Image: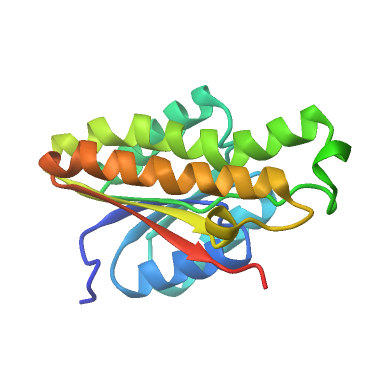
Amino acid sequence: MGRLAGKVAIITGAARGQGASEAELFVKEGAKVVITDMLEDEVKQVADTLNAQFGDVALGFKQNVAEETEWQETISKTIAKFGKVDVLVNNAGITGITPKKPEDYALSEYEKVMAVNATSNFLGIKYVVPEMKKIGGGSIINISSLAGIVGMGGFSGYSVSKGATRLLTKGAAVSLGADHIRVNSVHRCLC
């Protein structure tokens, strides 16, 4: 058995790339995973592949992480399928359409980046914490970026959203420590 034997994890943005790799690694370590993405066919294919290789270990479906009701549905589906939630990986994220100077950003584009990259993390935490408290603890991992620490030219909305993720993580970690819920962020590089 692996280090995550008996654990249930929700991983967003898991249709491909880093999220799909996270899901595979979690399953190899013994976890069951609920994986979501806006790319419905692709995320279901990732789940099907994991189930074919490892048994009934994955559930994949479409989720817009910026929508509150879809977070409620994701938590409900997870509990219905696997009975609990031990881990949340807030992996979903977007950079924005193309590199732009701040004065050239459309407000709608900026707001979309903030919704997907920052508000979604808040919503995930909001709805997973009550379930983690029921089982005595858990782990929340927010995927951030070095751009949230030092900034990234041409993607100011992305930098702001990842800076917000970093500080949300710190605040949640302080607030939830007494409940045995760890909250950490991973700062990846878009190099």
Q: Residue furthest right?
A: 104
Residue 15, horizontal then vertical, whole percent = 61, 57
Classify residue 32 as left or right of residue 147.
left
In the image shown, does 164 or 151 lie closer to the viewer? 151
Q: Can residue 106 be seen in this snapshot? A: yes
Q: Quadrant of the C terminus?
A: bottom right
In the image shown, does 116 or 42 lie closer to the viewer? 116
Classify residue 67 as left or right of residue 158.
left
Residue 62, horizontal then vertical, whole percent = 60, 41
Say which quarter of the image contains residue 123: top left
Q: Can residue 48 be seen in this snapshot? A: no
Q: Residue at x 43, y 57 (%)?
A: 58
Q: How many marks?
A: 0
Residue 107, horizontal then vertical, whole percent = 78, 28
Q: Quadrant of the N terminus?
A: bottom left
In the image shown, does 41 or 114 lie closer to the viewer? 114
Q: Residue at x 24, y 57 (%)?
A: 7
Q: How is the image coloured?
A: rainbow
In the image shown, does 61 or 161 lie closer to the viewer? 161
Q: From the viewer's perspective, is residue 49 above or below residue 100? A: below
Q: Residue at x 56, y 37 (%)?
A: 65
